[in-house]
Amino acid sequence: MASFRTKSPEETERLAEELGQKLSRGNVIFLFGDLGAGKTTFVKGLARGLGVPKDYYVQSPTFAIINEYPGRVPLYHVDLYRLEPEDVYDLGLEELAEQGVLVIEWSERLPFFFDKAIKVYFEIIGPSERLITIEDKK
Ligand code: ADP
Ligand code: MG
């Protein structure tokens, strides 16, 4: 487990980019934290680290449900905020995790478990300061 204080969205992206460089097919990442805490910003950095071209616009998939970005391996980005448990079953998340890297916002709403997920916690410290704790798979 490691904690980092970031002082700007760019710093959060850079931190995530470093993690993204180490990821490979089959990795699942859970993001925990309030609205505006920096989860989607973190996914932007993950995408960079996974080699997703810079012209891909990474944004919250709240309405699209799943966004897919082409990197070294595909990055699947899900936000479960507005979904009911029965809808989540229909997404085929296990299959996506086998095909690439799966990152989940609001994973509290998952009606089942993934073992070995990397958990990342976001706390708002100030207007542009975040405490980000990365708890690796175990
Ligand atoms: P979430 O997905 O958790 O709702 P977003 O990443 O969409 O959060 O939004 C985070 C907001 O906080 C953005 O407007 C971003 O500019 C701002 N922000 C300010 N400081 C930081 C920081 N250190 N890290 C990440 N985001 C920050
Ligand atoms: Mg978000």
Image (cartoon, rainbow, N blue to C red):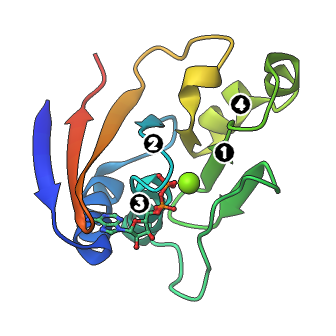
> Is 74 drawn above or below residue 112 in the view shown?
below
- Image spot of residue 62 (x, y percent): 73, 52
Judge by depth and name the residue closer to the eye, 77 or 99: 77
The first of marks 3 and 1 along the sequence is 3
Q: Which mark is residue 106?
A: none
Q: Quadrant of residue 138?
A: top left
Q: Residues within 10 Å of mark 4 (few under 14, many from 20)?
A: some
Query: Which residue in the structure is indicated by mark 4?
Result: 93
Kind of residue sitting beneath label 4: Leu
Query: Which residue in the structure is indicated by mark 3?
Result: 46
Per the image, label 3 sits on a secondary structure element best described as: helix
The answer to whether 97 appears left or right of 87 in the picture is left
Query: Which residue in the structure is indicated by mark 1?
Result: 78
The answer to whether 5 appears left or right of 127 in the picture is left
Locate the N terminus by quadrant.
top left
Mark-to-mark CA distance, 2 and 3: 19 Å
Residue in the image at 45% along x and 52% along y: 39
> Is 50 drawn above or below residue 62 in the view shown?
below
Mark 4–mark 1 CB contact (< 8 Å): yes
- Image spot of residue 117 (x, y percent): 42, 25
| Residue mark closest to the camera, 3 vs 1 | 1
The first of marks 4 and 1 along the sequence is 1
Residue furthest front in the image: 127
The first of marks 3 and 4 along the sequence is 3
Residue in the image at 12% along x and 55% along y: 5
Mark 3–mark 1 CB contact (< 8 Å): no
Mark-to-mark CA distance, 4 and 2: 23 Å
Kind of residue sitting beneath label 2: Asp
Per the image, label 2 sits on a secondary structure element best described as: loop
Mark-to-mark CA distance, 3 and 4: 18 Å
Q: Residues within 10 Å of mark 1 (few under 14, many from 20)?
A: many
> Is 113 drawn above or below residue 2 in the view shown?
above
